[in-house]
Amino acid sequence: MASVRLANVSKVYGAKVRAVENCSLDIADGEFVVLVGPSGCGKSTTLRMIAGLEEVSAGTIQIGDRDVTHSPPRDRDIAMVFQNYALYPHLNVRQNLSFGLERRRAYGSLVRALWDSPYRMNRRRETSDIQARVLAAAKTLGIDSMLDRPPRELSGGQRQRVAVGRALVRNPSVFLFDEPLSNLDALLRTQMRTELRILHRSLKATMVYVTHDQEEAMSLADRIVIMRDGVIQQIGTPREVYDRPANRFVAGFIGTPPMNLLDVTLTRLDGGTAHLRWQDRDLAIDGSRWRRADLERAVSSPLTLGVRPDQFRVLPAGAPSVLSGQVASVERYGSLCDIVSEVSGSRLVSRGAAALADTTSEGRTVALSVEGSEAHLFDSSGAALPRSD
Ligand code: ADP
Ligand code: MG
């Protein structure tokens, strides 16, 4: 096992595609870190630089205590799992699992044969060792009954297990995953997530995982790295990035359904109450969660108010509230429901218990209230206003 350290790593393709800019990231030994962000934000490039499949344009990469910035992939003690599985179609599962090890052994044996006459005996011992590792990996992943089948006779989920198994048998210091579950259907994807978490716990291996799916990132990661346009936006535990998004981008990217973001102006402070103007309305929220001096500085300037859907309370019409509007859509999800309301020409989403759907019909007027302590404020650059707690 090993830690991974990226220090000021950048990648420029050609003359001007700045795929990754000045990324620094410390991944602890045994940690499960997920890189997440929209398509094209530089996730795969970052992973491929860790793997040694891309040269860095600047910066250094360390695995354990070794600087591997210019080492070829085979010298980095990593194994990578790709989205498209990359299995050999003409080899069966057993051969796919052992291929990488056999190739390494062939090279090792060749070197030894030149020096070492009893190498045949070594060779027999290594063969049974490889087969034992293949069988152990296949059992761990529940594919031991299909070792003699070719990939085309396997389902997508089974193929993905073979791809993971091929990394597993190599027992690397660091596992790298590039969107390994994206080709699977939704149910299988959530099952495989759980299995990867369990696998991670039992191996205690360092894992770096790339996905564009923030829910997948939240469910898998010890720590999440959110990227945008090649730049790291925030690094934190799932809880930290959800509860304390560092900026407006992270706020809107993490969470389902997304946070409601309203362009407001802070008009005045009245004791602990902050008055925000949103379109033609005055929203009074509890301002005590933010540092007083920063709030005072923000008076009269444009801000973004962020409210998670589950932090809007839907109240009967006429109840005292900060907002009222018309219900545009009621969407049930088993025990939960989302209510989309039209308020002053904007759509606001609130999430509550399914029972709410029974009493809230489309077209009706509703009131929404928000607790100030649960809201987020971002300045005109998008950065979160510093909190007092
Ligand atoms: P992600 O994995 O987050 O979707 P990538 O790391 O694949 O993003 O790509 C980041 C940026 O670099 C994109 O703008 C992409 O078009 C560009 N890019 C990726 N690979 C190459 C390449 N080999 N040559 C030129 N540009 C590339
Ligand atoms: Mg990618």
Image (spheres, helix red, strand yellow):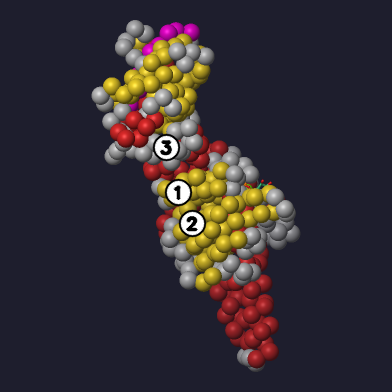
* Disc 3 element: loop
Residue visible at 65% across and 50% down in the picture: 18
Q: Is residue 233 visible?
A: yes
Please name the amino acid that badge 1 sits on: Ile
The image shows residue 157 at horizontal and vertical percentages of 59, 47
Instruction: Read off the residue under disc 1.
Output: 235
Task: Tell whether 289 sits left or right of 63.
Answer: left
Sequence order check: which comes first, mark 1 or mark 2?
Answer: 2
Q: What distance separates the C-alpha of mark 2 from that of mark 3?
A: 21 Å
Q: Which residues are magenta?
A: 363-372
Towards the viewer: 285 or 270: 270
Q: Nearer the viewer, mark 3 or mark 1?
A: 3
Please name the amino acid that badge 2 sits on: Leu
Q: Which mark is residue 384?
A: 3
Can you tell me whether the CB of the residue at mark 1 lies under 8 Å from the nearest atom of ligand 1? no
Rendered view: 325 above or below 101? above
The image shows residue 218 at horizontal and vertical percentages of 46, 43
